[in-house]
């Protein structure tokens, strides 16, 4: 049994676990993925023996106070990405996944394990996973809001209170071109276009420059309409649009991949840092907004609330 279990090792879960561990609270993270970070993700692929990477999830951290604090904690795993217009953003180095890996260093993390249910029984939470069962006195769930119901059950109070949160899908294209391909911009954002975000990934510090690499995100409506469509067709459509935006022939394309994020964007957040029911908390970027620092702040705020509960329970036991 663990005293505290955090389900989800994205930025919220990592922030929460770090804060709790710093105060001496035994805490364990469980995540279904192969690595930590959630949508702070980096995809690796090889072309002609050369490894290239794509940040196919979160693109950067902005210069807000929370973002700067998060980046400082992962010192050595971040750098400034200069956009060529006098502005810059904070990015993980050599990929966005480097920041959560650095921040999770020293934490007790169990990966490749899917939590299927959490139920309160006899003063503890019984946690069932695809690898077996465990129990905890305190549980923090930091999965996307729509994934609370399968874990807790449709009628659970936290599920009901999170029902107004809206998360939208995002289809993300990863494309590599020959090095001599024209690059008309570093980033382009257009909320009215099918490709709402386009970024030249190899301009970020620490990335391979063997090929010119691009990440393009489709708008939520088109992503929703095509999330279960033939992925090769969705990829072809996005490649055609990207080539048109860059003004290049598709013949220069060396690689194309597609990532489907079913809950990639927060459209309507909860409006506060977390939800709580007894010794059970739920949080994530969906509580505060759509940015990395929103996820981080949710985790930090949950930890502060857990610690107040923890101190009270210790006093009661004494």
Image (spheres, rainbow, N blue to C red):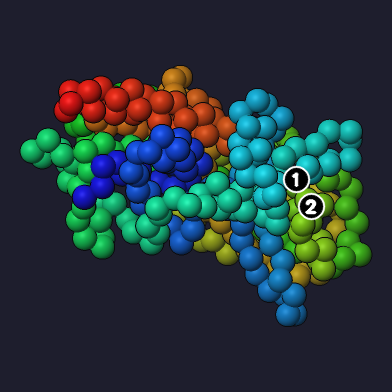
Residue at 88% x, 61% y is 181
Q: Position of residue 105 (x, y in %)?
A: 52, 52
Please say whether residue 17 is visible from this viewpoint: yes
Q: Position of residue 253 (x, y in %)?
A: 77, 67
Q: Nearer the viewer, residue 109 or 249?
A: 109
Tell me if label 2 and label 1 are in contact, CB under 8 Å.
yes
Query: Outermost residue toward the top?
Result: 271
Does residue 117 appear to the left or right of 7 in the view shown?
A: left
Residue 161 in which image quadrant: top left
Query: Outermost residue toward the left?
Result: 122
In the figure, 180 relative to 23: above or below? below
The tag on residue 205 is 2
Q: Nearer the viewer, residue 96 or 193?
A: 96
Q: Position of residue 298 (x, y in %)?
A: 46, 29
Residue at 81% x, 48% y is 245
In the figure, 311 relative to 229: above or below? above
- Quarter of the figure that contains the C terminus: top left
The tag on residue 245 is none
Q: Nearer the viewer, residue 234 or 164?
A: 164
Q: How many neighbours does mark 1 have within 10 angstroms: few (below 14), some (14-19), or many (20 or more)?
A: some
Circle 2: element type: loop
Residue at 65% x, 39% y is 71
Circle 1: element type: strand
Question: What whole-number distance in Å separates the C-alpha atoms at marks 2 and 1?
Answer: 7 Å
In the figure, 225 relative to 271: above or below? below
Does residue 195 appear to the left or right of 206 in the view shown?
A: left
- Would you name the residue on which mark 1 appears? 79
Residue at 86% x, 59% y is 248
Q: Position of residue 271 (x, y in %)?
A: 46, 19
Query: Outermost residue toward the front?
Result: 318
Please say whether residue 117 is visible from this viewpoint: no
């Amino acid at each position: 049994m663990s005293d505290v279990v955090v389900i989800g090792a994205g930025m919220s879960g990592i922030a929460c676990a770090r804060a709790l561990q710093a105060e001496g609270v035994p805490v364990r993270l469980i995540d279904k993925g192969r690595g930590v970070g959630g949508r702070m993700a980096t995809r690796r692929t090889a072309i002609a023996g050369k490894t290239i990477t794509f940040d196919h999830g979160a693109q950067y951290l902005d210069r807000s106070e929370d973002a700067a604090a998060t980046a400082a904690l992962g010192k050595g795993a971040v750098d400034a990405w200069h956009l060529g217009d006098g502005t810059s953003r904070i990015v993980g180095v050599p990929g966005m996944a480097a920041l959560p890996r650095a921040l999770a260093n020293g934490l007790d993390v169990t990966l490749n394990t899917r939590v299927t249910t959490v139920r309160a029984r006899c003063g503890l939470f019984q946690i069932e996973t695809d690898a077996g069962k465990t129990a905890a006195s305190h549980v923090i769930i930091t999965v996307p809001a729509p994934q609370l119901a399968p874990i807790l059950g449709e009628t659970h109070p936290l599920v009901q209170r999170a029902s107004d949160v809206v998360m939208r899908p995002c289809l993300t294209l990863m494309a590599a071109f020959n090095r001599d391909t024209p690059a008309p911009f570093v980033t382009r954002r257009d909320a009215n276009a099918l490709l709402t975000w386009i970024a030249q990934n190899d301009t970020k510090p620490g990335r391979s420059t063997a090929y010119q690499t691009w990440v393009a995100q489709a708008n939520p409506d088109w992503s929703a309409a095509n999330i279960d469509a033939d992925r090769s067709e969705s990829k072809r459509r996005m490649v055609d649009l990207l080539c048109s935006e860059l003004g290049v022939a598709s013949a220069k394309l060396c690689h194309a991949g597609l990532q489907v994020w079913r809950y990639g964007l927060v459209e309507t957040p909860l409006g506060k840092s977390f939800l709580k029911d007894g010794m059970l908390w739920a949080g994530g970027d969906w509580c505060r907004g759509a940015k990395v620092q929103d996820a981080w702040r949710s985790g930090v705020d949950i930890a502060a609330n857990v610690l107040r509960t923890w101190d009270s329970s210790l006093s009661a036991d004494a």
